[in-house]
Amino acid sequence: MWINMGPQHPMTHGLWNLRVRIEGEIIEEVDPEMGYLHRGIEKISEDRHYNEVITLMDRTCYVAGLAWEHLYIIAAEQALHLEPPERAQYIRTLSDELQRIASHLMWYAAFVQDIGLMTPFLYAMRDRDLVLDLFQSYTGARMTYEYNRVGGVRNDLPTGFTDRTRKVMDWIYARFVDYDHLCLDSDIFHRRCDGIGVLSARDCVDWGVTGPMLRSAGVRRDLRKDRPYAAYDRVEFDVAVADGADVTARYLVRMEEMRQAVRIVRQTLDWLDKNPGPVLADRLPRWLGAPYAPVGREGYLLKRNFPTGRGFSSVEEPHGEAQAYVVNTGGEHPYRVKFRSPVFANIAAAQKYLPGYRVADIPPIMGSVDICVGEVDR
Amino acid sequence: MQPDVLRERLGPILGPRLLAVEPFAGTAGRVRFAREGALELFRAVRDTLGYRHLAMVGAIDWVDHREVFYVAWSDEERDYLFLSTDLPASDAHVESATPVWPAANWHEREAFEMVDVRFDHHPDLRHLLTPDEYAFHPLLRSFKLHEPEELEVKTRNV
Amino acid sequence: MTGATLYSVSAALSALLLGAVASILPAPVSGWLTSADVVTGLAVLIFSAILLVASMINTIMLIWFERKMLGRFMDRRGAMHVGYAGLLQNFADGLKLFRKNTFRPQEADSLGFYAGPTAYMVTSMILFGVLPISTGWSSGALPLSLLLALAIFSFAPLFIFVSAWSSNNKYSLIGGMRSAAQMIAYEVPILLAVVAVVIVSGSFDLNVIVNEQQNYWFWFPLLLALIVFVAGMLAEMERIPFDLPEAEAELVEGWNTEYGGMLFAFFMLADYVRALIGSILVVLLFLGGWTMPSWVPAAATSFPLAGIFWFMIKTYAVFGLFVWIRASLPRVRTDQLLRVGWNRMIPLALLSIVLAAVLVTVRCLPFLGCVPPVGG
Amino acid sequence: MAASAPKENPTNPLSGVVRPLATAARQFTKSLIRPSTIVYPYERLEDPKFRGKVAVASGRPIGVGDVWDNYRGVHALNIATCISCNLCAFSCPDICIEMVSVAGDDPKHPKKCPQIDYGKCSYCGFCSDACPEGCLTMTTRYELAVTKRAEMVYSPERLHEVFQRKLPMNPIRLERPANEDAILLDAPLCIGCNACARDCPTKCITMLDVPKPTARPGEKLPRRIWKEPVVNDSDCVRCGTCISVCPKECLFWGTHK
């Protein structure tokens, strides 16, 4: 029997359709159908000014907007031959890690609901709200930040921000114990999550699976360590790895990543306290600097030649490794922008890690993948 | 792995089908190859060079021709490798990478529907994001976006 | 059996009403109206009306209680806007559902689709007539009221399955099958746990069972039976952690996926009716019913509604326990649930029967006192 | 530390049930008096009483304090200082800003001010970043629910009303880049028509006389007014109006040698 789980289904966390062929309660075959949230972000980007693409990045992945901004910005800066100031690099690192906490809390909230727990959902959302408050205090928005700019970030951190962030980090760090009490110490949690959704390390690599799913299979791979970008080579942290490759292992990896993120945030805050400086490169061309140039004016670019370039960036986004490829042919719009979402590959591998388990296992398994349909469909 | 090393190791396998190896920031290099050698190159890159993880496949419409690019990652090198090939716009097809990297499956489906590049011997070449009967290829340059004014929604209340 | 009972009140009310009406009517009609049969008939009607209204209000208050309490567990407030602290929120919700169009999927079987929720609701409501609430506040001393209650209680899987099947929806069907399997699996341990109580009290009459608990409540000597009974009740009521039939993460809304409007409200309300009845059964069988703790001063025990007061306190406390469990435990899987039901619960229940037999043989427990002689 | 070994499964099912129950009960007692919820229509996070403290525990309101200073909400427009430079409209990625006339002192030449369609706006703040005079800023107002689509369009007057409410405004002003381009003139193409100077919102363009060359015999002088625009760079806001109105495309962006 084929059943359609989605596009309107509590398990999907977004708009997509998981077609499942079941025999009794056992899954025989799956066929994910994507595209319900396809907004053509790559196409729209071709018609937009380099800075204006940033507004799309927040909407590409609506739970990890700053990480996606960062991804695009690295590629765009490489394509435009620009170098951001060091303070901006640290602020981006800080933003990435705060975003990782917020995103993982969002994942935790959605995941525990998939296994029928409502209480930690609200705990996680409450604590995520504090991180969003921090975002709001320096980017000006809670979800669509529009904070990075080609060549740096929009504005410096407000006064008192670092102290507030430290307090919030202390609070959240203490809360992680409660999360573990409600899940990891629960007998039923282990009955539900141990040994399901297993995807071996070899399958992970073959199917392009990255991020916490890959690290839960025991592969120690983290772009922040392997190819440090921004200020990640100047902060100390450990890569969270677990064995088992099942749902519990993914849970452990993400919880440990949140703890490590708190650690990184504290280090960047210390650095930011000591090193004031500019946050936007001062040698920006007029049409990229702020305030923004009228982009509709043709006369401007006709009379100038800009360097062309290609930018490729890869970022350890909360969901996994994301890549961006920006082709600059000298216009004020990028010629082609291509994004690779980690969740895209993680869902594509569903035919490897779902069959053989039960229908009731689908929510925890797909919940442990941490799906953000916005970045799959783009 | 430096571009010249790449050239040394891939040259004997591909011969004239290896067009160029250029340096490309953020990756080990950009390998440009002729499409006839696609499958051999993929095998060599995966098995000989150790780039076991395929990160993405994409395509660019350069109006006169189309470019298909592959990005692979090696755990040993801790680096990306960028492969690209040019296809004539009139006859844009290339061998599918799915036998080598299963991960290419969805990426190639997306490139197929968006930029109209066909992948030979792909196990399941359907549209991924757009409906099956959708007759356009949105990421071609000839596909123009509407002006916002044209999309103005008329409602009863306004 | 002192003071007014619910039936005596309604009989008096009925006599008063009929007398008033008869006084303004001509002789033959008034004579017929005041005849004993008519008075009794109206008294029964009034009795059931009062019972219905009281149980409905209690059910709705139970929903409010759960919402507020669950809110505190989750560090939020629950319903806040309609009425004081959201007291009237559920009435507003009910009104909204009542105004909604009830639609039927095209391919659904009409008879089963409408009859299922109605029968589910009705069988659940009937139970209130069977359960004694306080001394004299029942519809009569049925010698086998416990068996009757459990029998009616276990009608539910049938109607759930009927409505699920006739919805013609795959999720509904899976949910219905799960529901039937789960309820049947947990009927057995529940009945076995009840047998332990029956052995100790020596009767199937709920009134007698409560009266047997004058000296000490059964929860402590029959702790094992209580645990089995509560776990089984959780499964019967389909509450977390055993709410697989409507596990919203995988089955949307389980067997009531296709229901909307008032039919959905029937299911929702009947679920809470069953929750209330489950709590009442726990109180009656294990927590001494309307008997009061020994530290309550004698003056307070003779207060007219004291029995009902204590009964309600206990019922809501038991339901609070269910809410607490719901707030802290995840949902188990079907196969695990069934395995626990057949492999763990039934042996535990059998063990509790043995313990009950031992208790009856020993008759007296240290610190607690003695069981009255069987049948007394 | 790196590889967080999986915790031992609670072998005892009893403790595996008791720990979660205890955690939930602890939270229950904490939030019995005052849960963390802020009852939104009656209490607001931007209220001063929630400011300036990191009060996150249950029983006290959540708030990180001062989070509203940079908030990007509904725009406030000061019509009096608006110079109609169009920069906001040009910088808008969603094309939701339109320059419309407002009633002013001079009925013949009505002033153009931005009108914002909040049905399209993404609150990115590019417009307020681009505004050279700081007259278009974003406030902390975020409630926009209306019943008709047309009410989502805020006319300049409505934006001015928001300004008059004196809501907290986004204080961020971006520095101009040191090497920004200036307006340059391709002198041989200029016909001295005065269009740029007439339309310049800051009036930083002055038309200076250029000497009329004497025509050599047989040479035909171009028909033009013998004036050339000179841009005062310190006053120029780089809006590009002059470039767009120039009939001969003789003005362009560039850097001074």
Image (cartoon, helix red, strand yellow):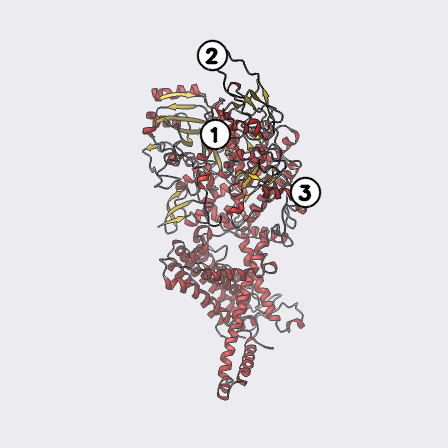
Examine the rendering and report whether any part of residue A222 can be seen: no
Percent x, y of residue B80: 45, 27
Disc 2 to disc 3, C-alpha distance? 81 Å
- Residue linked to disc 3: D52
- The residue at 37%/64% (across/down) is C111
N-term-proximal mark, 2 vs 3: 3
Which residue is farthest bottom?
Answer: C27
Type of amino acid at the residue the image marks with label 1: His
Q: Secondary structure at mark 1?
A: loop
Local packing at callout 3 (Cα closer than 10 Å; few below 14, some 14-19, many 20+) is: some
- Residue linked to disc 1: A333
Identify the mark at residue D188; answer none if there is no mark: none
Mark in front: 2 vs 3: 2
- Residue linked to disc 2: D218
Type of amino acid at the residue the image marks with label 2: Gly
Residue D24 higher or lower than A248, as above or below = below
Local packing at callout 1 (Cα closer than 10 Å; few below 14, some 14-19, many 20+) is: many
Percent x, y of residue B128: 38, 39
Q: Observer-nearest residue: C54 or A35?
A: A35
Percent x, y of residue D58: 63, 49
The quadrant of the picture occupied by the C terminus of chain D is top right
Q: Are marks 1 and 3 in contact (CB under 8 Å)?
A: no
